[in-house]
Amino acid sequence: MSHLNGSTSGNPSGTGLRLKTGLAEMLKGGVIMDVMNVEQARIAEEAGAVSVMALERVPAMIRAEGGVARMANPKLIKEIMQTVSIPVMAKARIGHFVEAQVLEQLGVDFIDESEVLTPADETYHIDKHAFKTPFVCGARNLGEALRRIAEGAAMIRTKGEPGTGDVVHAVQHMRTITREIRILTALREEELYNEAKQHGAPYELVRMVAQEGKLPVPNFSAGGIATPADAALMMQLGAETVFVGSGIFMKERATPLDIENDPKERAEAVSRAKAIVIAATHFNDPKIVAEASELVTGTMKGLAAAAIEEAQLMQTRGW
Amino acid sequence: MTSEHLTIGVLAVQGAFEAHAQVLRSLGVNAPLVRLPEDLASLDGLILPGGESTTFLKHLERNGFFNALATFVQQKPSFGTCAGTILLAKDVRNPVQKSLAVLDATVERNAYGRQIDSTIQETETTLPGGTMEMVYIRAPRIAAVGDGVEVLARRNGDPVLIREGRILAATFHPELSADRRVHEFFVEMVRREKLAHSATAAHAG
């Protein structure tokens, strides 16, 4: 299967996808944190984040402020890459393969083709095989996950509803993906062709999932995770790592904690970051999740996802 | 004694622990995941997997885990890959960071570059069975080793698989290849150590 062994990835040894998913393997059991500046990146690393996502505005701010959300300024991304020793990710708009080319040029370790940014193409996603840098993509269900994997994604994450601090849609997406996987494992061979049609996904990938009982790439979770218990919930539901976006550095919906000038707010950000890291590792140990939760001072206020109008949802972006 | 009686834990605070546990299980070894200091009790050996060494250190700060692990790796066979090797080395650079310091080696983090520089290579090794596929992911570089360290493989001159007494360390990821020789080698180290230990105990008794 040429589209899985990475032979079209520009890597002549045909090892592209293994190296890409290899990095995702190293990120398992961890927390990937959204950061908007060097100081936040430093706090994230010191708290034990496995990676940081460099961006100019976290989803909660994009949601509150509106406008077109684009790839972050390369200067910011480079500063963050120079500050931390852990892998640095950055987001490109859906379908915006030139933003992805720029991010690869900068040397970021993972590119998130993300619904958090304003889509650049309403039909096509980026051909991710054309890059040596691995991609992560969001999905709400198995079909969407497999379409992204067919395009070359090396990691899938639930979309959830970004920037809300409301975990309900991340839960729904993870439950949908894992339930659809379990159903495939119970079906007969000849039933899989129709399943591929129903899911809008390549038959080879559907068959692979039916045989293995899991996605062919690591399965992470994002979108509304704001507390240690949220992180542990997603891990118990089958996530292998969690992304925390607005949940660590935001105070009100559109206002970041003032970590530079206010020691109390800085301590609050540190406490949230550390606690979520502990909970992601000890997700099966309620005693430790309780201890971690107790460490937290203050939580992002959040926005109930059910109160968001259809047109304002980010999760419906992507095809 | 067969390998069914061996229990080799995998440090599972973060990283590629599940891939290691699967390889160990395929070799007939019990492979419990180690997330707390008390999980180290009753293990015959331990694998410290790849992942982010800065994250590992954060988890080890809690509940005396660091000291418990430092004691364990001085007494029982331990095998580090990538971040695990960083944790075992005496001297860690780029940046300087704390470590268990049981392996006489200098290790530089991310010395071969970022993810774009990650690579898979076929490399000579002193282990029987010919060249070995080695998967490097944002790999550290072993810049120097002490006199007591045996080098089992090199990449362009740099040691990539080394052994010092009970400690085995790789800068690549054998758990991501189909070749099981490195894990088999470690399981054999653990088996011999356990045999020697039980013989000594019997003699003393």
Image: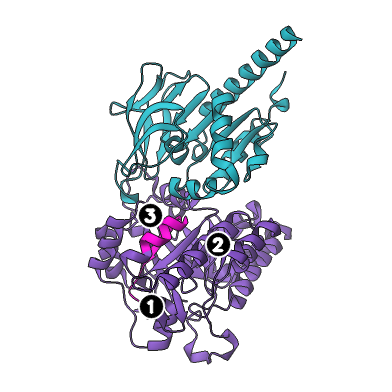
Chain colours: A purple, B cyan
Residue wearing tag 3: A87
Distance Cα–Cα, label 1 vs label 2: 28 Å
Distance Cα–Cα, label 3 vs label 2: 21 Å
Label annotation for residue B32? none
In the rendered image, residue B14, in percent from the top left (x then y), is placed at 53, 49
Give the residue at the far left of this rendering: A75
Residue wearing tag 2: A275
Secondary element at tag 1? loop
Specify which label sits upstream in the sequence, 1 or 2. Answer: 1
Residue type, label 2: Ala
Residue type, label 3: Pro
Q: State the image quarter where residue A265 is shown.
A: bottom left
Label annotation for residue A117? 1
Specify which label sits upstream in the sequence, 1 or 3. Answer: 3
Which residues lie in the magenta part? A41-57
Residue B170 shown left or right of residue A308 in the figure: left
Residue A210 vertical placement versus A60 (above, below): above
